[in-house]
Image: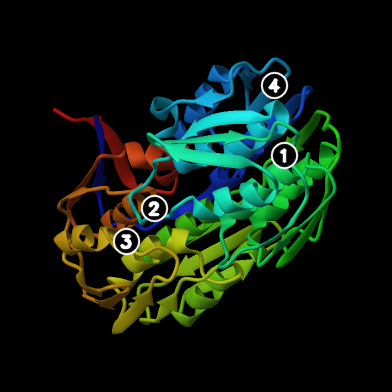
Amino acid sequence: MDSILIEGGNALQGEVQITGAKNSALKLMVAALLSDDPVTLTNMPELADTGFLAHLMRHLGAEVAIGPTGTMQICAKSLGEPVAPYDLVRKMRATFNVLGPLLARKGRAQVSLPGGCAIGARPVDLHLQALTALGAQIDLREGYAYAKAPDGLTGAKISFPFVSVGATEHAMLAAVLAKGETELLNAAREPEILDLAKLLNAMGARIKNAGQASIQITGVEKLHGTTYAVVSDRIEAGTYALAAAACPNSDVLVRNCVPSDLDALWAVMQRADIDVQMGETSVRIRRGPERLRAVDLETQAWPGFPTDLQAQFMALMTLADGASIIRETIFENRFMHAPELSRLGADISVHGREAVVRGVTGLTGAPVMATDLRASVSLVIAGLAAKGQTRVSRIYHLDRGFQNLEANFTALGANIRRVKDD
């Protein structure tokens, strides 16, 4: 197992190029199961998670070819037995979304209930309720969802009791081949929802108003292949922006991003006295030597502040002047990074879904342990700003969502490297 060693205290200077969005790429890969024709995805991130899903799709009978420079071609013409076993699903939740496409294509499926980061319960109840509304018969037993729709799926009106990105995406993936009309109410509006709809429409689906609270889908008989570029990763862009903001005297240009996807982040950063300059496909982050201002934060569904940037922002606030209150409204167990940040000298107290961060004048390097994907990179950010050496272990979490992390930070002037554990 590997660790990351960081000698903190360096300013970050230069440019970083953002890759395709992990959270979108995984669902676009699953969408390829809906067609007999090849689907080619460009701007694909090279991550452990995309590798896990590619392995599962091959198991299902799809041909997956990974080409150079972020290209992946998937052909699901000859799907085999529609069974996704526990060993191939347990590593991440996104694999559960093969259930809907398999039902739509094969009329039946057996998919293990998912695993992934331990940041909360995140049940798949809404996924199953949406598929049931579309006519699927689902039986849960022995850790699996056994689903069948021998006569195919049928369009329906589905009203989600609360906003769920995963359930919205899953319903879209199933409804595009359902008979008749489907309406999704209280749908998620994240940019990744719009990205999935754009791919499905490019494949011949009929989806209207994706990115709005009400999405209309008219089912079609079949989808065809296409070539499609994955949207850039807003969470990766925000992570590098927050890393630059955490290190005094930094000046970093984040390229190949969609700045408007992160308006909530830029607003909070500017309140903390960080210089944010937005371009059409880039954002420049500048930070002087002075301490930042402490600001409060509450995570929300898009267009609010993303829960996937909460841990990184907390790392930033550990060195701010004053106290900040961070409220996590999306997941009930997403402050597991707080005790690890405290090992570096941070002053954080957690009460349920609220954390109070009292800024300190300096952090000191120490051994820390990653607990999930976004928490792990928050420890890297804190290590970059701390004095002395920080060792981040269990970085397999990082490899799930960040491509070339050490190389990118090294190019910005950080002293960071990957080492083999004893």
Q: Residue at x 47, y 55 (%)?
A: 240
Left or right placement of residue 156 versus residue 2 in this view: right
Q: Amino acid at mark 2?
A: Arg
Tell which circle, 1 or 4, labels the residue nearer the N-terminal end. 4
Estimate the x, y position of residue 10 in percent, counting from the top left: 32, 55
Q: How busy is the neighbourhood of tag 2: few (under 14 within 10 Å), some, or many (20 plus)?
A: many
- Between circles 3 and 1, the one closer to the viewer is 3
Q: Which residue is mark 3?
A: 333
Q: CA distance from mark 3 to mark 1?
A: 33 Å
Local secondary structure at mark 3: loop
Give the quarter of the figure containing the C terminus: top left
Cβ–Cβ below 8 Å for labels 1 and 4? no
Q: Which residue is mark 1?
A: 229
Q: How busy is the neighbourhood of tag 4: few (under 14 within 10 Å), some, or many (20 plus)?
A: many
- Between circles 2 and 3, the one closer to the viewer is 3
Q: Which residue is mark 2?
A: 374
Q: Residue at x 67, y 52 (%)?
A: 133
Q: CA distance from mark 2 to mark 1?
A: 24 Å
Q: Which residue is mark 4?
A: 76
Tell which circle, 4 or 3, labels the residue nearer the N-terminal end. 4
- Between circles 1 and 4, the one closer to the viewer is 4
Image quarter of residue 329: bottom left
Vertical side of 313 occupied by 58: above or below: above
Q: Amino acid at mark 4?
A: Ala
Local secondary structure at mark 4: loop
Q: CA distance from mark 2 to mark 3?
A: 13 Å
Q: How busy is the neighbourhood of tag 1: few (under 14 within 10 Å), some, or many (20 plus)?
A: some
Tell which circle, 3 or 1, labels the residue nearer the N-terminal end. 1
